[in-house]
Image (tube, rainbow, N blue to C red):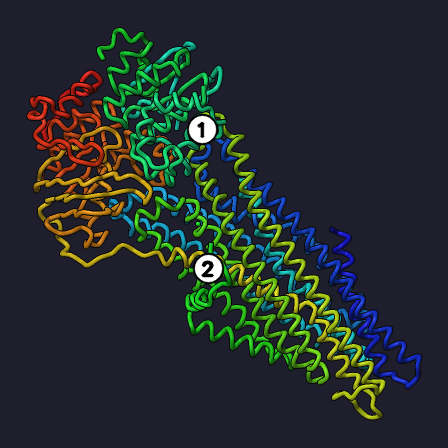
Amino acid sequence: MKEARDADDAGRDGHPVVVGAEAWAQVSWIPSPGSLAYGCCCVALLGLAAVLKATLNTQYSFRQGALACRLRSALTCLVYDKTLLVSSVDMAAHSSGAVQTLMSVDADRVVNLFSSLHELWSLPLQIAVALCLLYTQVRVAFLAGLAVVLALIPINRWLARRIEAASAEMMGCKDARIRRTGELLRGIRQIKAAAWEPAFLARVEEARQGELAALAVRKYLDALCVYFWAATSLLTSILTFSLFVLLGHALTAEVVFTSLALFGVLIAPLNSFPWVINGCVEAVVSVRRLESDLALTELCLALPFGSLTALVGDVGSGKSSLLAAVLGELQGVAGRVRVCGSLAYVPQQPWIMSGTLRDNILFKRPFEESRYGVVLEACCLDADMRALPAGDLTHVGDRGTTLSGGQCARLALARALYQDSDVYLLDDVLAAVDAPVAAELWERAICGPLLRGKTRLIVTHSRRFAAAADSLLRLEGGRVAYLEGSGEVEEVRQTGHVKPRVYTAYAMAAGPFLVSVILISLTLMQVTQNGSDLWLSYWVRAFSFANGGLVAAQRLHERLLTAVAAAPAAFFSATPAGRTLNRFSSDTATADDSLPFILNILLAVLFSMLGVVAVLTYSQPLLAAAFIPLALIYRWLQGYYRHTSREIRRLGSVARSPVYAGFSEALDGAATIRGFRAQAAFAAQNVDRLGTLQRANFAGLAVAQWLSLRLQVLAASVITLVAGLGVAGAAGLLPSFASQAGGRAGAGLVGLSLSYALAITGLLNGLLTSFAETEQEMVAVERILEFSDLEPQEARALPSSWPEQGRVSFVDVRLRYHADAPLALAGLSLDIRPGQKLGICGRTGAGKSSMVAALLRLTEIEGGTILVDGQDIGAVPLRHLRSGIACVPQTPFLFQGTIRENLDPMGQQQLLCLARVLLRRPRIVCLDECTANVDAATARLMQELIASQLSHATILQVAHRLESVMGCDIVVVLEGGRVVETGAPMQLLAAKGSHFAAMHKAAQQGSSMSPLPRM
């Protein structure tokens, strides 16, 4: 690669020497065959140098791009693998947003470092060669140009330090923004249920403002670099020629135009130098980032092989922390944990992968039909599979959003059973299912033939199950209170071109005024460049672009964030969080940084190209005829390339989303993956996804170099044609606008046209590649607008006091989670009076949580009507509806906080969720199995708080623990999405053949609570 770069530099610096010879041929023209041959030789050498440079430049770029693809894959795999290796405690110091940024933005910057490193030694070499060649033309006068270059070095160092500091600050704010966005997406159902969207949008926007402030500093410093280096060309040439004349030398055509061509060679690396240093600084920041409370005390115990141990204790006693320590998620400061054999782990909050039910059970293991069937039966999933149209091939949605809490728990248990491990860690796995199902799971799964002889440690609050275990382990304050035998215990991408509306939307995001300023400054820049440079035009262009890009970035992100937060809950069930997060990370980073940069280059190159064509046409009018076929070839090339590169970019964007989705999924389930020792399988899957992405990237690289070679050869033909016309005109063979006395071509205009023709190579290549890259980068804006155009759920406004009474009516309500799913609610009808306390019971999957989802419009109903105070909730604004109904969800939600908050078990999270509800004092309250993961004392405390603090409210309490609904006014029993029984608890218990009585009898033996206070 280095050899190709050296040869490329040699070809670039060789051009001006031939130009000098060509100009000399015009000045010293003597009509003789020898002179004509000399001119033709110069023309041939000029064309050959251009073709050679094109070939070597293409080879260098291709090899560099191929290396970048391999390096990007390696860095992404390293970050992913490290995520699966690092324990949860160590990961607590790094937010998921920071890790996502490492994989996307930082990896790209480190990859770009390799290009910058080559430029770092190549650019000074080019500058040195150009200065040496200048010395041959203007002697010691070249020192004036060298003085300008040296004077810029300390300025450049100061700018580099400031850019580094701004980049580091920006990346920190970007981490915070992506982390908060990830929290918003992960808890979107709970956030929507509580109408907290404004508060969470404010948190994201706060981080975004910090990010934009740092980005603004960096962009304005970049603009300052552009201004300084753009002014260097004029300053260098003026000082050099002035000193040359003062030293007593005469300016000739050969000296002037060779020197001008050398200044052109000199300015290219000088202009590139700020961007190279900027890239190196950003890469250094990213490299540093890539490099970049005890729960248990004095706990000693040993579990015999093949035993079943029940782990009990109060909320916060250390039960979940003990399991985390066995998994290796918690690192002890003293002592050690030793596990003999393989592990399987079922967390308190089941982790469900996006995919089918079968994928979640197999968990990267081969399919064994006999064992698979036994596992389904043991986990009571066989009936659920038969009820689904696609059976076990049904897709579960992102994080299992189409399943009930009980189904998720049984699915996670089935995954563990299918693995056939030696040690099983079960964290309160029976809490999310009703009593009869829990009893079946205990008998068939936990104590059944599949786990007989396996070592099992199960966290439970049920006295019955604790009593049935071989031994009982009680924790208090992180210590073993006792370890005894249990006998003493009583109990589918866009296609085609990027639509014009995408460009219009981006321009409008920047604002009409700034767009006008940019276009005027570009015109002024090129007009003055062809005459005498007006430095103000560079200043206006650089800073207006920086400001316009910032304004557009802010408005696009604000629009995207608002639209996603306002999207219906069904959108998040059907769309993986990683796909959405990709819009906020990779696509937003492109709109923030890459797109304004390449758009700036595109417009500058376009106006420069127009200026060059105007000068060439003026100096040699015959070129106008030659430009017509060249323009047709150019148009064909750009059309062919644009179509191909645009679709490849879209394929890459589509392939990138699974990488982000898989990364986000692995972050959520890292503890489970490590518990099953499945890191290698998930790492292999990540490599496969990266392979698909890199195939698209490599195809894009190959297509870009295909185009580059053809454009540079086309530009070489223009250079050769200009030089040939100059020689022919000088020989009197062709009429020329530049012909002067004696039929000889004017050396001045020939030299001018050759100087401008040399720029054709870079301009033609730059124009098409920058246009294609702009269109490719616009795909990011297109993807942002795709999510920005999500239709919000809104309706007409109601009085702020609504609901005033708290009456709730379900009238023939039908609900399903997606088109292919069975009905979760099948004609449910129910009337709840104001202030009534309603207990909702039924087998797991009966539709209890679906009632809550329908009431909060987290999932839109398919038919029927839900009325609150006589008002159809379908016509109520969502924020108003959810503000009037408080909910303690089945799955609690906490956002970024202290390490202790991240280590807290589920029970303490439920208490915080209840505290939020008590502060709001709403008219309607939904309690979705809020006591399922807490001990008896905590459950009693929660019920007392509800009874005393929410006595005025209408309460819908979903429960598996039937004791918790004994204090309700009315109990409703659901089955198959319908109401099968309703009445007062004691009346139903006394009724013969009552469903509720049968459920209570089955659950009575497993109860861990005494009767609770009446609400």
Residue 772 location in percent, x, y? 57, 63
Tell me what residue is drawn at x 56 percent, y 38 percent.
687
Quadrant of the image for the C terminus? top left
Q: Is residue 239 shown left or right of residue 220?
A: right
The correct choice, above or below, for 138 with respect to 225 in the image is below
Query: Which residue matches tag 2?
Result: 781
Q: Is residue 519 shown left or right of residue 845?
A: right
Residue type pointed to by label 2: Val
Q: Is residue 278 shown left or right of residue 451?
A: right
Residue 912 picture quarter: top left
| Total numbered labels | 2
Residue type pointed to by label 1: Leu
Q: Is residue 672 visible in this depiction of the protein?
A: yes
Query: Which residue matches tag 1?
Result: 362
The correct choice, above or below, for 590 with respect to 543 in the image is above
The correct choice, above or below, for 833 with respect to 678 in the image is below
Residue 717 location in percent, x, y? 75, 71
Query: What is the residue that sits farthest to the bottom in this orientation?
Result: 741
Residue 331 location in percent, x, y? 45, 25
